[in-house]
Amino acid sequence: MQLTNRNNNQYRITVEQLEPTKQTLMFEFEDREDLFALVDNMKKGSELDNASSTRLAVALRLFGPLVIAHRKHPLFIDFMPSFKVFMNNLKKRIKSVAAAN
């Protein structure tokens, strides 16, 4: 994987299906955000269990930039306003929970 920006973090995601047959899906991506810090913040501020917090943080970090990059695409045009509200509310909640602790 070739970095397009030196400041970006480089990641590899691997998903393994355990049953009924073992299959693997793997891809690499780069991101300006520190995914591990985001997961840690989500665990601290979302009030979800650790596994759910991790899944949510990773899913949003993979999905969010895709939605934003293609916000005018017919698949996302109706979703974008709601996604923006959701993300703003999530960020506020995580900050408020972190500030209270």
Image (spheres, rainbow, N blue to C red):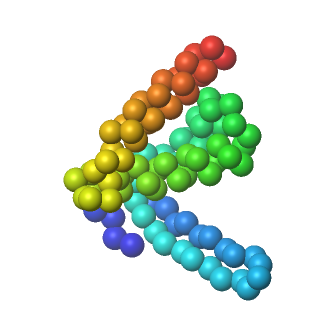
Q: Residue at x 34, y 70 (%)?
A: 2
Q: Is residue 2 left or right of residue 93?
A: left
Question: Taking 8 as reference, is 42 above or below it?
Answer: above
Where in the figure is residue 43, as x and y percent of width and height? 66, 37
Can I make out residue 68 in this image? no
Q: Does 4 sit above or below residue 81? A: below
Please identify the residue farthest to the right as the structure is shown.
Answer: 19
Furthest-bottom residue in this view = 21
- Provide residue 58's location: percent of width, then percent of height: 55, 52
Which residue reaches farthest top?
Answer: 100
Image label count = 0
Q: Position of residue 54 (x, y in %)?
A: 64, 48
Q: Residue at x 58, y 47 (%)?
A: 56
Q: Is residue 69 left or right of residue 97?
A: left
**Is residue 11 in view from this perspective?**
yes
Q: Residue at x 40, y 49 (%)?
A: 64
**Who's the residue at 54% across and 75% down the image?**
26
